[in-house]
Amino acid sequence: MENYADDIMDDLLVKYLAEEATPPEQEMVEVWIKANDNNKKYFRHFQTIWNESQKLASRSSIDENKAWHRFQRKVKKSETAGSMLKGFGWWRIAAVIVIIAGIAWIVSSLLETGSSEPPIVSIISTSEVKKDTLPDGSLATLNKNSALTYPAAFKGKTRKVQLKGEAFFNVSPDKQKPFIIDINDVQVRVVGTSFNVRSINGGTEIIVETGVVQVSKADTTVEIKAGQRILFEKADTIARVVASDDKLYNYYVSRVFECDNTPLWKLVETLNEAYNVDIRIKRDELKKLPLTVTFNDESLDVILEIISQTLMIKVSRTENEIILE
């Protein structure tokens, strides 16, 4: 699991340094770099190697194809390395990597032996939902375009992780070792419970499904119980705890869209995110129409047909959007 995450991170670092990363990927890399000193050190070395390779590539007279094949045989990862570098078109860079492979190996060795801290694991989801079991047995499900970093082993008195984006956690109980999530400028602290955390335009929302969660921002600390929700806007230090009437929040975990007197606009908002579509409600009076229905891993076409029949509205499509009217 750790090696796979490292491969993804190296892949993103290449795109980041080549200025080919998407905005969400850029944010993920920057969050990962800031997570701890080991990551910062690794990035500095990675950046140094990248810069040197650019210089060498500009004046290299090496037969790149032959060098690339030698490199593949040397590292014994021809399929993985090939798919990554060919995807970016870095044939000249590949040849240079043969020259500096020894440097990279030394950097890696120094990083592994130079610190007594557990290595950091990074789980990154871009276009699909990902699930992971943490070192303490807790389960984390990451929504698309999210990133979670945590140590390979939880040492000390806490279990601390860092989140970017959205994730649903089912935390293993341990009263002696609280589970702590850092997201934006908010800290979420639990012992053992299940809850959803997500970043919204720089703000932070927490919805508790079971147990009790303690949320802190600046000098404010509040407790949220099962069935409750809190939202800190980006600039807020105080937020009000309210009942959570939203049963759609964990659709990406369960693949179930549960509407309980839910306004149409809220379901549409969730469907747009889940299916990566652009559904628009043409008339304002339709937005608040309530729906009580459960869609269990249904296709978008089936869901739209049921909405149409239930609310007696028309569904039409254009090339880029779906209109409800």
Image (tube, rainbow, N blue to C red):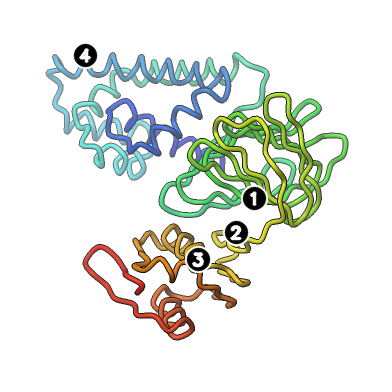
Residue under the point 55% across and 46% down: 166
Closer to the camera in the image, 151 or 216? 216
Few, some or many residues within 10 Å of mark 4 (<14, 14–19, 20+)? few
Res. 250 mark: 2
Q: In which quarter of the image is the N terminus?
A: top right
Answer with the quarter of the image where residue 187 lies: top right
Residue under the point 23% across and 18% down: 54
Q: In which quarter of the image is the C terminus?
A: bottom left
Of tags 3 and 4, the one toward the viewer is 3
Few, some or many residues within 10 Å of mark 1 (<14, 14–19, 20+)? many
Q: Is mark 1 on a helix, strand or loop?
A: strand
Of tags 1 and 4, the one toward the viewer is 1
Q: Position of residue 209 (x, y in %)?
A: 73, 56
Type of amino acid under label 1: Asn
Provide the residue designation for mark 1. 196
Closer to the camera in the image, 279 or 60? 279
